[in-house]
Image: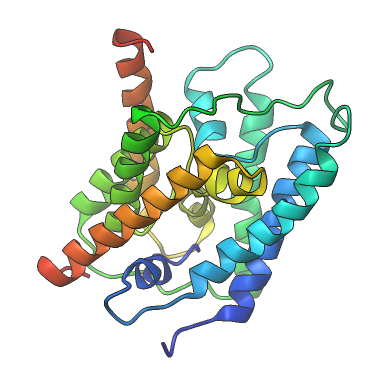
Amino acid sequence: MSHFTPLSALLGGLLIGGAASLFLWLNGQIAGISGISRGLLQPTRGQVLWRFLFLAGLVVGAAAWYVVSPAPVAREGFPTSWLIIGGVLVGFGSSLGSGCTSGHGVCGLGRLSLRSLVATLVFLSTGILTTYVVRHLLGGQ
Amino acid sequence: MTNPDKVLGFLDVTGDWDPSLLFVLGGAVSVTLVSFRFILRRPAPVLAPAFQLPTSKAIDAPLIIGAVLFGAGWGLSGYCPGPGLALLAAPGNQELWLFVPALFAGQALFLLWRRFFPQ
């Protein structure tokens, strides 16, 4: 538990919650990153610019943070195939399940949506199970 | 949340467990739980004509299967969409240049699949 960082985690969480609140208050939408990004793949009139700007803000915000604070040291030798398979599963799964950690987790739980609570519990459980299998049965990173 | 080691350290409950991510989610939800109540009392958002909220309440197979697949990909890679995209800004992390295109490929695959098997 030497790497436990509750204070920065809590502060980051409060900022994420604040950002999701602002987006709902100003724009009236759920800040779900998977849904916002998927919309770029089916561009329709009036639905491209705001999505692009939102995601660009996400990247620019992180870039600004890395100016003042060093980025976490990147993993070395993490299997390429796991990144690709993981990415495809995350993209397909969050589309089929209508949300990811932001849409179901941060916003759905905030709306007291039972659907989001179920999704969050399911993806947390499968995430834990997958990590167990990969790290402890397959001996991965 | 933008550190995959911390994400996997959180999901690895039987290993050297790092509960930090619980504080991220807890912090975020503690804000939205309160703020959303007040915001959704308004007749409309500030800059748009109406709120656009998900209407489905169904706890159905797509929800569960989707969450299972998403959790598996998250646990395998240590990335979910938000942190994955944000980390494109991280100097020295090349992993996202594989993960993010794969994420969009997974979404494209879903859209293609939906075209052949509409709901």
Q: Residue at x 50, y 63 (%)?
A: B1
Instruction: Estimate the x, y position of residue B63 in percent, counting from the top left.
Output: 40, 33
Residue A49 in sight in this render = yes
User: Do we see residue A64 in this rendering?
Assistant: no
Q: Viewed as shown, does residue B117 lie left or right of A34? A: left
- The one of A18 and B65 positioned closer to us in this rendering: B65
Q: Position of residue A83 (x, y in %)?
A: 28, 51
Q: How many marks can you see?
A: 0
Quadrant placement of the C terminus of chain A:
bottom left
Q: Quadrant of residue A118?
A: top left
Instruction: Establish if A38 lies above or below A42.
Output: below
Taking the image as shown, residue A114 lies to the left or right of residue B98, namely right
Question: Is A101 situated above or below B102?
Answer: below
Question: In the rendered image of this protein, does residue A90 appear above or below residue A1?
Answer: above
Quadrant of residue B23 in the image? bottom right
Q: Position of residue B113 (x, y in %)?
A: 30, 17
Please report the residue visible at 31 percent of the width from the left and 62 percent of the height from the top: A128
Query: From this viewpoint, which residue is outermost toward the left?
Result: A138
Q: Quadrant of the N terminus of chain A?
A: bottom left
Residue A40 percent coordinates (x, y): 53, 25
Q: Name the residue rendered at 38%, 19% in the picture.
A: B111
